[in-house]
């Protein structure tokens, strides 16, 4: 069993760290004080990430997919430096659907896709349907060549700056469908929400009122026809092999997991990695400070109670990271345990990140509470983690259901 990154993963992690420290870290303080990024600021971040090969065009995606762990490393390292940028880039994943969209959409949006200038968001939560998202009311009723969408989504990361929204709605039969809504073609209104942490991240409420979405933007249809049809052949060129596609992990996942469970397995493993990233930042700052700060004539790092805190922080951070990568790997492998593992990791890592960030403040004494230092931000950013993509309570119920089996769900 291997708990270490291999050489190429270490090289990737180190160059990513260098990029984050040089290109992203200098932007954090000012933007966090200013509040949510506007569109131009968000695009600037997206373009910077493109420089290190992060994007949703076929080429960038196949580079990242050559070692799927790279995406996990991205999540952990970027959250360590700036959660707002991590959320913006990570949740732009609906942009990848442009690769398999209708010819019209594909041609129109390809230049922006290639430049990593397409910002995406994922909208399932509603004002009356949070943890219980099955009770959502947003409707998408087929009307000629369009779906007519009505409803409100809330707490949607990046929605104020997004070009594309992957929307979850009920169709005319009451069945859950996913639609790719392009804001320019199918306009909708968005209002901003402000929050405790991740202050640089734009978050909003979306209002759909008779919003018309072309019926070819039904995501399941897009994926099914791409898996079997010409688009994939065109995208993959000589590498296209229908048998390989049919036996791919993605095809396996599609066959074994409901689409929202598949999305949640990735989002939740990603949130666990995010938590490990924030905890690591808080721990690193505490180690430096404990070496430097002197009281009673010696560095506080020589006080046993400070060492005990560092011991606990390290144990919680390492456990979170191991759990998170384990869950992430099971999700990538379309393993039947992925749902349980991602909820276990998300629930655990996000709760303990709050504890680690709180201990980091304690080690720093008064300056830990000052906004001149990043400790209070780590704490606020960590505190955000226990709610999105399923609260800790919901993760516990998912794990309970997965351990006990069908018929034991506590929430239906
Ligand atoms: C910063 C942020 C970003 C977000 N980004 C997105 C996004 O991009 N897209 C998106 O769709 N959503 C997003 N969300 C929404 C998020 O997923 C929901 O906030 C979350 O699922 C909880 O829903 P709720 O806020 O309505 O709380 P509620 O569901 O109302 O929960 C309130 C409390 O009741 C508890 N509770 C609920 N049901 C049970 C139960 N059965 N047993 C025990 N306790 C229970 C919860 O754990 C919680 O403590 C985001 C939220 C935040 C805060």
Image: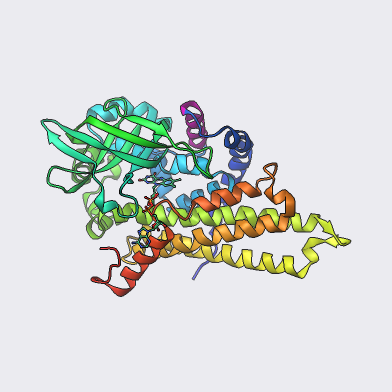
The single residue placed furthest to the bottom in the displayed view is 404
Q: Give the image's coloring scheme.
A: rainbow
Q: Is residue 376 above or below residue 332?
A: above
Where does residue 376 sit, x and y in percent of width and height? 63, 48
Q: Is residue 354 above or below residue 85?
A: below
Q: Which residues are magenta?
A: 39-51
The single residue placed furthest to the right in the displayed view is 297
Confirm whether residue 12 shows in the render. Answer: no
Main SS of the magenta part reads helix
Where does residue 105 sit, x and y in percent of width and height? 26, 29
Q: Is residue 277 magenta?
A: no
Q: Is residue 249 left or right of residue 275?
A: left
**At 10% from the left edge and 30% from the top edge, which residue is drawn?**
144
Q: Is residue 95 above or below residue 397?
A: above
Which residue is at the front of the view, 55 or 297? 297
Q: For residue 402, what is the image quadrant?
A: bottom left
**At 30% from the left edge and 74% from the top edge, which residue is drawn?**
404
**At 39% from the left edge and 55% from the top edge, which residue is drawn?**
390
Where does residue 91 sit, x and y in percent of width and height? 41, 43
**At 15% from the left edge and 47% from the top edge, which residue is drawn?**
174
Q: Is residue 49 magenta?
A: yes
Where does residue 304 sit, x and y in percent of width and height? 76, 70
Quadrant (top left, top right, bottom left, bottom right) of the C terminus: bottom left
Q: Is residue 318 left or right of residue 164?
A: right
């Amino acid at each position: 069993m291997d708990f270490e990154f291999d050489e190429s993963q270490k090289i990737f992690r180190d160059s990513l760290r260098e990029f984050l420290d040089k290109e992203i870290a200098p932007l954090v303080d000012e933007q966090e004080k200013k509040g949510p990024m506007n569109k131009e600021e968000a695009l600037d971040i997206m373009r910077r990430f493109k420089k290190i090969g992060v994007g949703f065009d076929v080429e960038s995606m196949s580079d990242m997919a050559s070692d799927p762990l790279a995406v996990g490393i991205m999540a952990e390292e970027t959250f360590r430096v700036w959660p707002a940028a991590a959320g913006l880039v990570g949740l732009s994943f609906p942009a990848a659907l442009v690769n398999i969209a209708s010819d019209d959409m594909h041609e129109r949006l390809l230049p922006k896709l290639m430049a990593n200038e397409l910002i995406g968001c994922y909208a399932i939560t509603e004002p009356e349907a949070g943890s219980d998202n099955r009770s959502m009311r947003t409707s998408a009723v087929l009307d000629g060549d369009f779906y007519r969408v009505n409803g409100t989504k809330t707490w949607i990361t990046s929605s104020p700056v997004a070009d594309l929204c992957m929307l979850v709605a009920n169709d005319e039969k009451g069945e859950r469908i996913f639609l790719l809504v392009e804001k320019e073609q199918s306009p909708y209104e968005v209002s901003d929400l402000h929050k405790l942490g991740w202050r640089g991240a734009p978050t909003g409420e979306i209002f759909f009122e008779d919003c018309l979405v072309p019926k070819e933007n039904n995501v399941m249809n897009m994926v099914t026809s791409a898996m079997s049809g010409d688009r994939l052949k065109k995208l993959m060129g000589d590498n296209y092999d229908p048998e390989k596609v049919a036996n791919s992990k993605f095809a396996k996942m599609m066959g074994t997991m409901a689409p929202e469970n598949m999305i949640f397995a990735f989002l939740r493993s990603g949130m666990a990695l995010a938590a490990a990233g924030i905890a690591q930042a808080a721990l690193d700052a505490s180690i430096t400070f404990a070496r430097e700060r002197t009281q009673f004539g010696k560095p506080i790092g020589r006080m046993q109670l400070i060492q005990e805190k560092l011991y606990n922080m390290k144990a919680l951070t390492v456990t979170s990271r191991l759990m998170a990568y384990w869950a992430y790997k099971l999700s990538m492998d379309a393993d039947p345990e992925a749902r349980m593992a991602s909820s276990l990791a998300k629930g655990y890592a996000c709760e303990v990140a709050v504890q680690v960030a709180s201990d980091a403040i304690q080690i720093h004494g008064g300056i830990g509470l000052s906004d001149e230092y990043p400790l209070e931000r780590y704490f606020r950013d960590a505190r955000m983690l226990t709610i999105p993509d399923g609260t800790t309570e919901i993760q516990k119920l998912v794990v309970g259901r997965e351990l006990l089996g069908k018929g034991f769900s506590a929430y239906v």
